[in-house]
Image (cartoon, rainbow, N blue to C red):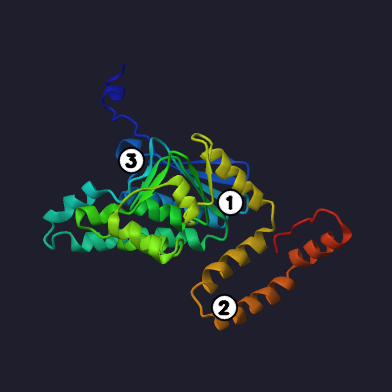
Amino acid sequence: MSVQAASSPPLQNPILLREAAGHIAVLTLNRPAARNSLSEAMIASLHAALDDIRDDKAIRGVVIAANGPAFSAGHDIKELTARRADPDRGRAYFAQVMNACSAMMQAIVHLPKPVVAAVQGIATAAGCQLVASCDLAIASEAASFATPGVDIGLFCSTPMVALSRNVPRKQAMEMLLTGEPVPAARAREIGLVNRVVAPGREREAAIELARKVALKSAYTIKLGKEAFYRQVEMSLAEAYRYAAEVMTENMMARDAEEGIGAFIEKRAPRWQDG
């Protein structure tokens, strides 16, 4: 062994893996020893990957998965706690991390492509928030979900934003106030996940679901996803006014003309994604 090789630091595994499954990008959290906690670096890596995918026309969908027994245990509490020694007791750093995480979660919502979570194990706190922020979610029967911050004196306020937009209020409040884990089957009942599959099949099932959406017009999916998240924050009358504008705009698109024509002519549509 050369002196240079002996003195070189060992290569570290990347904390976020990216691979392609056809037109689907699979992003895999890769900090299994840390239960895939959302460290500052992990948040930044996820956000950068989403930004890179946004305008990549070859990618028509995204799956977020994880290695190891846990999907994500939420924020890296050890990383946060280490900043208690700062002159402001960590206040500025805590705000920086929480805002960065919130921006990353919103990047999922604003991505003009479907994002599917593949949950193989526990998803707690910001890990549960990550699942709730995705458009769709597939869970293993072995998965569970919780917002247990209340148990350590730290209410899951930012996870609450995504959770309360996915499940009914009473169920969200029960999770937030008790911190008790919700098994996969119950998560499906309350609308936190779409489907529950046998352990080990969640990633494959998530890719299959993303591919099913990817067969549609990319323009239509982009328009519809944006409209969905905007209208849910509006009053009923405002939502209908906005949706009528979106439908009108959609009707003028080439893909709508092609899709309607294909339907009438009983043939497969040829999308132009415009």
Image quadrant holding the N terminus, namely: top left
Residue 168, image x, y percentages: 44, 64
Vertical placement of 271 versus 236: above or below? above
Residue 230, image x, y percentages: 52, 72
Evaluate whether residue 202 shows in this view.
Answer: yes
Vertical placement of 67 versus 238: above or below? above
Q: Residue furthest right?
A: 265
Residue 29, image x, y percentages: 41, 42
Judged by depth in the image, the label closer to the viewer, 1 or 3, is 3
The residue carrying mark 3 is: 35
Image quadrant holding the C terminus, namely: bottom right
The residue carrying mark 2 is: 239
Task: Say which of 183 and 270 sits in front.
Answer: 183
Report, in whole angstroms, how far the alpha carbon at label 1 lies from the one at label 3.
25 Å
Q: Label 2 is placed on what type of residue?
A: Ala
The answer to whether mark 1 and mark 3 are in CB contact below 8 A is no
Report, in whole angstroms, how far the alpha carbon at label 1 lies from the one at label 2.
26 Å
Query: Is 91 on the left-hand or right-hand side of 205?
Result: left
Task: Say which of 264 and 257 sits in front.
Answer: 264
Judged by depth in the image, the label closer to the viewer, 2 or 3, is 2
Instruction: Kindly identify the residue that appears in the image at 52 percent across and 72 percent down.
Output: 232
Vertical placement of 147 versus 36: above or below? below
Judged by depth in the image, the label closer to the viewer, 1 or 2, is 2
The residue carrying mark 1 is: 61
Task: Say which of 182 and 15 sits in front.
Answer: 182
Q: Residues within 10 Å of mark 2 (few under 14, many from 20)?
A: some
Which disc is residue 155 wearing? none
Instruction: Kindly identify the residue that appears in the image at 19 percent across and 63 percent down.
Output: 91
Mark 1 / mark 2, whichever is N-terminal: 1
